[in-house]
Image (tube, rainbow, N blue to C red):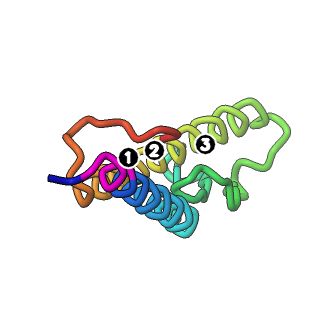
Amino acid sequence: MKSMEEMIQAAQQAAETVQKQMGEAQAKLDGIEVEGTAGGGLVKVRATARGRILGVSIDDSLMKPEEKQIVEDLVTAAFNDARDKADRVANQQMTDIAGGLGLPPGFKLPGM
């Protein structure tokens, strides 16, 4: 039978392992790129799976003063599309990590 001290030490080591893996996962997410699109690809937003915006591309055909409102709407839609894709990738990465740690499905890691 393990002593209380041994169990506490094992729990601390497990917590450190989880913390290290979470840090690695966050770094990995920042290296995964997603692209949100709107208007059939007329507007594209590149972002990391962590949600950091890398760039915006707007087709030249939209660069007219009378298209301003449409461009703004499409940029908003492309940002939202990129965010949704980033969230899906991030959630899958976190599920993979949780599964690798033997945590129950649906268990939310603090800070995620």
Q: Are marks 1 and 3 in contact (CB under 8 Å)?
A: no
Residue 91 marker:
1
Decide if residue 62 is on the left or right side of residue 81.
right
Nearest the eye: 106 or 80 = 106
In the structure shown, which secondary structural element does the residue marked by tag 3 occupy?
A: helix
Q: Residues within 10 Å of mark 3 (few under 14, many from 20)?
A: many
Seen at 51% across and 56% down, the residue is: 49
Which badge, 3 or 2, is on the more N-terminal residue? Answer: 3
| Residue topped by disc 3 | 79
Instruction: Name the amino acid type tagged 3.
Output: Phe
Q: Is residue 6 magenta?
A: yes
In the structure shown, which secondary structural element does the residue marked by tag 2 occupy?
A: helix
Q: Which residues are magenta?
A: 3-8
State the count of labels.
3
Residue sitting farthest toward the left:
1
Instruction: Name the amino acid type tagged 1.
Output: Asn
Q: Is residue 109 above or below residue 11?
A: above
